[in-house]
Amino acid sequence: MAPLPAAAPPRSRPRPLPPLLPPLPLLPPLLLLLLLLAPPPAAAFNLAASRPAAFRGAPGSLFGFAVDFYLPRPRSFSILVGAPKANTSQPNVTQGGAVYYCPWHPDAGACTPIEFDHIGTRTHDFGGNGSEGRDAVEFKSLQWFGATVRAHNNSILACAPLYSWRTVKDEPGRDPVGTCFLSVGNFSKFVEYAPCRSDLNSAAGQGYCQGGFSAEFTQTGRVLLGGPGSYFWQGQVISATQEQIAAADYPEYFIHDVAGQLQTRQAAGNYDDSYMGYSVAVGEFSGDETQDFVAGVPKGNLTYGYVTILNGTNMRSLYNFSGEQMAAYFGYAVAVTDVNSDGLDDLLVGAPLFMERTAEGRVQEVGRVYLYLQHPLGAPPAAPPVPPPAPAMALTGFQEFGRFGSAIAPLGDLDQDGYNDVGIGAPFGAEGRQGLVYVYNGGAGGLHPEPSQVLRGHWAPGHAPDFFGSALRGAKDLDGNGYPGKGLPPRGCPLAR
Ligand SMILES: [Ca+2]
Ligand SMILES: [Ca+2]
Ligand SMILES: [Ca+2]
């Protein structure tokens, strides 16, 4: 597919509002556990899956919906856990959601909520003279704060994709623009980043953006957000450096003009209902030193779905990778790591609703993950980009309705053989839909086609399945020297929920 065309004028058309979060049915779990896999014995290559550490949150809070590691300093290691339906101390806010800071302890420990939002709900005097009082202009109940959590050094980004605002125009309506908060300097400063809270409201503009539905940091700490609902659900991706975000943060204003921000623009009407930015990742694909942006577009291209790679310096389209089957949700998850150790980043794409035909001729939904190996470009920038390659391999799920490929996590080089390894979640895999995480090892030819290990959720008796394998993180060198340290988990150990 071609690069996105330039901005088109907004169109207005009556239409129902498709629910974006979550488009795949998620059942309300009773309790969520966060599993941090404990250190393996020194000589073993496998993770000691029988001895996970578990952190628990309040029932119904969706504790563990998002997870990440937090390493503000070398050898200072903790875990961040999003609980997007948690209740907070914010006045007049119901189930606004929270992010918890959980210091690492081998037996797991207490988690405390991080106070990202010091301001709470802001108001505006629509009468203009103060006589009619002030009305709320933003709505933080059920905003799903903590649905997205990412950390980079001593910074943390946490987002509320269903945060709504009324706009400061004197007209009713609530637009789910989404918002994010950034903690910088190890909790020394908090700034808001809500790039879709703009004058481009309603579905025709950025009103249904749900900014922060997905997010990632680049190696240099640049923020990348996905907002899959902008422009009649064409979706968009937006990026700015932390410095640019902090420089534009004036809490007394609702619309922040972030100088230097990069973003995709509105495209022609045939790109509507595509959900660009449903997932995002970063990697280097253009032959320079600046990481580029990867965005899943799972309903684009007539619902075949595609994944686009945008140049990290200017958002120009570099490549598009298309799915092979309609409605498979190709691009639901994306991940980047170098699995064949040639120094070039490779791309993984999940299509958790992919259907295969069994030997008996029956069609069953099992999910699939595609691996695209990056090949040398030649001499950039003169050489044109090579055509989108075919996947080097496809890994297919094992259980019907298991949602294999819902989460993909680079795990670093778990077994220390020189090739990076990957975890793939199947949150409804296993009997009782209890969820599985598969570990696939890298190698010279890509990934080994069979998983080297299958991790199961550990559940207390009587508790319902909790989507184990739907949130995965890994690949952090947790003690800073590549070797397990005293009281620290080992290199590459995954976090799974
Ligand atoms: Ca680049
Ligand atoms: Ca590679
Ligand atoms: Ca390996």
Image: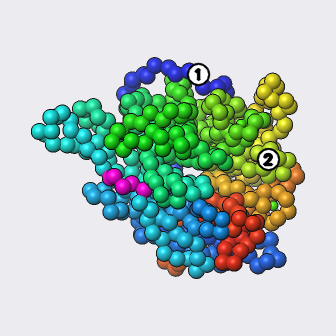
Residue sitting at x 80%, y 29%: 380
Q: Which residue is mark 1?
A: 5
Q: Main secondary structure of the magenta part?
A: loop
Regarding residue 370, the answer to whether it shows in the image is: no
**Residue 171, position as x, y percentages in the image:** 25, 32
Disc 1 marks a residue whose amino acid type is: Pro
Residue sitting at x 76%, y 66%: 482
Residue sitting at x 33%, y 63%: 89
- Residue closest to the eye, 82 or 233: 82
Q: Which residues make up the magenta segment?
A: 116-120
Residue extending farthest left: 131
**Residue 411, position as x, y percentages in the image:** 71, 59
* SS state under label 1: loop
- Quarter of the figure that contains the N terminus: top right
State the count of labels.
2
- Residue closest to the eye, 171 or 459: 171
Residue sitting at x 48%, y 71%: 111
Residue 194 colored magenta? no
Cα separation between marks 1 and 2: 31 Å
**Which color scheme does this rendered protein use?**
rainbow
Q: Is residue 62 above or below residue 267?
A: below
Q: Earlier in the sequence, mark 1 or mark 2?
A: 1
**Residue 225, position as x, y percentages in the image:** 54, 42
Q: Nearer the viewer, mark 1 or mark 2?
A: 1
Whether the residues at callouts 1 and 2 have beta carbons within 8 Å, the answer is no
Residue 472 tag number: none
Disc 2 marks a residue whose amino acid type is: Met
**Residue 238 falls left or right of residue 178:** right
- Which of the four quarters of the rendered structure image does ligand 1 lie in? top right
